[in-house]
Amino acid sequence: MAVKLPVYMDNHATTPVDPRVLEVMLPYFTNQFGNAASRNHSFGWQAEQGVDTAREQVAALINATPKEIIFTSGATESDNLAIKGVAEMYREKGNHIITAVTEHKAVLDTCKRLEKHGCQVTYLPVSKEGLIDLDELRATITDKTVLITIMYANNEIGVLQPIEEIGKIAKEKKVLFHTDAVQAAGKVPFDVQKMNVDLASITAHKMYGPKGVGALYVRRRNPRVQLSAIIDGGGHERGMRSGTLNVPGIVGFGAACEVAQKEMPAEMERLRGLRDRLHQGITSRLDEIYPNGSMEHRLPHNLNVSFAYVEGESLLMGINDIAVSSGSACTSASLEPSYVLKALGVGEDLAHTSIRFGLGRFNTEEEVDYVVDRLAETVSRLRELSPLYEMAKEGVDVSAMQWNTD
Amino acid sequence: MAYSDKVLDHYKNPRNVGSLAKDDPNVGTGLVGAPECGDVMKLQMKINPETEVIEDAKFKTFGCGSAIASSSLATEWIKGKTLEEALTIKNTEIVKELNLPPVKIHCSVLAEDAIKAAIADYKGKQSVSTAEGATVASATAD
Ligand SMILES: Cc1ncc(COP(=O)(O)O)c(C=O)c1O
Ligand code: FES
């Protein structure tokens, strides 16, 4: 079967809406367009019914109860609400927050802003594997600590933090635990009870649902978490997030959660197979390929590797019928290589050559084979063009070279 | 980001890729950039010492497509020029020819720097070889 181009393998950035999800959403744009807060006519009731079902579906995916789900505009908002909401609500108790250097900007920049408003933030480092150290976490907690916020799965390297262990520590120390579970929810098992998670951010568009809708899980029992709202208004979502609900989006989010929950075991296995095929295909055809982050504690559908001596943007240009992303400086607006790879201690020379592959529900084995072929061809060609490759072959230690940068 | 057709053309069919013998006294080598800022460019030229005309040029570049295109274009432009003429090539001309957007201007600067570095390397070698010639001459005079 011929491969349909372009091939999409950037599922950590976003995912297409599953046709089954779209189908459920469509009536909510037309006949069932009501405002879920309209209490006195059938349009409102229908919309409310759709939202209620979705709330149950989202809750079921993460083993929460429907009342613990607050719908938002996406995970950026959920992260902001969780962190700012806790910081403000528990100000009397303390002002210390613990997070990690590899978090998403929605968490890091929120923490940075809070620092300007009197919070103290500890940014835990990570190992070469991308994992935080649990003893270090434990040692960092003080009586002023109100929140630990550590992501479940990293969006660049797919590394899974030991969420269950972190949850245990947080519970024992009576500190609230928020996790940005955007990349993990719907992909790998996520159970807020078993993992002792108090707050969790998720978003629909990373799990085959629509963009612009997400949720914050807020624990109601044992302990009951309280939050200060960051958006004030009509008091929707138990006052934690005002604003007319995005009914079609929420309905789609619910449907996406239901599909994900049902298909997770099979999908995990299938994508792991494709990911391993991709990895093996690349390493069997090319030398000096370096995976970034733990291959063991990792999302089954993620691969992040450095193609030594080949700058990432030039590689993307060569494989322009394949959608993936790079941690190279040249692809970023700031001309800085990925801060996540830097935090792992990946040398800048290798960080510039990194490519992130995010496999998804609609990728096929044929596509994987096509991608391997294109990569092998393009990397070989670009290495012939690379002065660093030439120097390495001549035995010059490129990473130890002194450069004249005046 | 969308690339101009000219960048794509140089990227797909880079001109003058390769290396010249860097120990040849008539070859100037410019190696500029740093892996830390993403780009490394090696530009070499073979110069006729009588006429100071650049008879051959080669490059290898680790960098984005615009950096590859800038260096490819630079080798095309310097071939057949005298050293003096080559020194007048400005990165802004490369930007114009390749239609580079503002974020890619530094890639063209690198190409200009590589030309200058290669010429400086050649000139350094020439003065060393004349100096050596002088020592030899004085030695025989003794
Ligand atoms: C780990 C992580 N957190 C948060 C977000 C932000 O999610 P959203 O696009 O729904 O605001 C993303 C996606 O970009 C992400 O990967
Ligand atoms: S070499 Fe990095 S942007 Fe051109």
Image (tube, coloured by chain):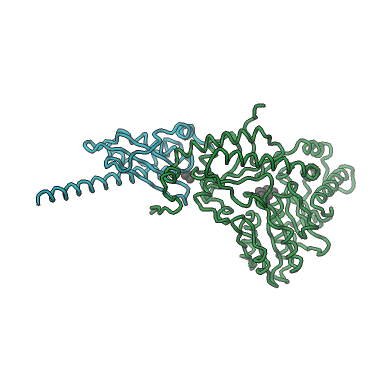
Quadrant of residue A339 within the rendered picture: bottom right
Can residue A252 be spotted in the picture? no
Can residue A204 be spotted in the picture? yes
Asked whether A353 or B89 is in front, the reply is A353
Left/right of residue A221 with respect to residue A145 in the rendered view: right
Residue A384 spot, x, y in % from top left: 45, 38
Left/right of residue A349 with respect to residue B125 in the rendered view: right
Colour cyan belongs to chain: B
Colour green belongs to chain: A
Q: Looking at this rendering, what residue extends furthest in the top direction?
A: A1
Quadrant of residue B56 within the rendered picture: top left
Residue B53 spot, x, y in % from top left: 27, 36
Quarter placement of the C terminus of chain A: bottom left
Residue B75 spot, x, y in % from top left: 37, 36
Quadrant of residue B50 within the rendered picture: top left
Quarter placement of the N terminus of chain A: top right
Asked whether A164 or A204 is in front, the reply is A164
**Total marks placed:** 0
Q: In the figure, A194 relative to B1: above or below?
A: below
Q: Residue at x 79, y 63 (%)?
A: A225
Asked whether B112 or A293 is in front, the reply is A293
